Amino acid sequence: DAGVIQSPRHEVTEMGQEVTLRCKPISGHNSLFWYRQTMMRGLELLIYFNNNVPIDDSGMPEDRFSAKMPNASFSTLKIQPSEPRDSAVYFCASSLRSKQFFGPGTRLTVL
Amino acid sequence: TQLLEQSPQFLSIQEGENLTVYCNSSSVFSSLQWYRQEPGEGPVLLVTVVTGGEVKKLKRLTFQFGDARKDSSLHITAAQPGDTGLYLCAGETSGSRLTFGEGTQLTVNP
């Protein structure tokens, strides 16, 4: 079985541009999580969905960040407009019960 | 906010040595998970401990959950270069939400 799939793996953009990160969870998993990892702050939960419904978005840093899950097999995390401090590795994870399976991450660099 | 503090943050040892990583919190968690992350990859789940006082072994790795379910430790016996990586503990709260510690970067030198 394929694991969690994320795209793109690397993204370099300029400040002010819109960035969209994509995630395909493991088939059959009913929870999906978006995390951000930096050296300074470690791994932070941004938002998570249960059965495609956003449950907790308290970790979303600002209104510039938004996430959607239109169906059970796809989710997006959008940053508009992007800023240099958004540079980080963004992970998507999915789970059926307590075990979370992480994707390989998207390394975002905002110049 | 429930915080998980890991120590040490960095650990560099020689092959064959033993080590222990600690994960502490003032909060009680329903379960505690340990992950290992290698460069360029996402964290991979190693173990989940649920019961206070529980001890789980995974080859040379021993995981323990504190009696009060607030802290945990990871002990590696006879470390090998393949054990090198970032070790993360994560406490589970409601709705399968995980709070991660800052991680321990382990380097095992041959």
Image (tube, coloured by chain):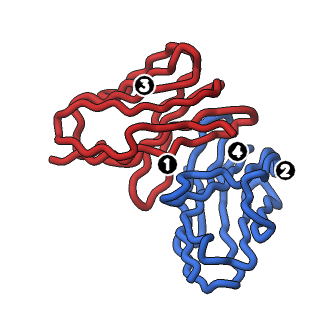
Chain colours: A blue, B red
| Count of marks, rendered view | 4
Label 1: how many residues lie within 10 Å, few (<14), some (14-19) or many (20+)?
many
Element type at marker 2?
Answer: strand
Residue closer to the observer: A17 or A54: A17
Quick check: can you spot residue B74? yes
Q: Nearer the viewer, mark 3 or mark 2?
A: 3
**Distance of label 3 from label 2 (alpha carbons):** 34 Å
Q: Is residue B15 above or below residue A68?
A: above
Numbered mark located on residue A28 in the image:
4
Label 3: how many residues lie within 10 Å, few (<14), some (14-19) or many (20+)?
many
Element type at marker 3?
Answer: strand
Name the spot of residue A19 as percent of width and height, x first.
68, 77
Question: Mark 2 belongs to which amino acid?
Answer: Val
Element type at marker 1?
Answer: loop
Residue closer to the observer: A9 or A46: A46
Is the residue at mark 3 from the same chain as the one at mark 1?
yes
Residue identified by numbered label 2: A53
**Distance of label 2 from label 1 (alpha carbons):** 24 Å
Question: Mark 4 belongs to which amino acid?
Answer: Gly
Direction from residue B66 to residue A51 in the image, left or right: right
Name the spot of residue A90 as percent of width and height, x first.
59, 62
Which residue is drawn at the image coordinates 69% and 40% (left, top)? B1
Residue identified by numbered label 1: B43
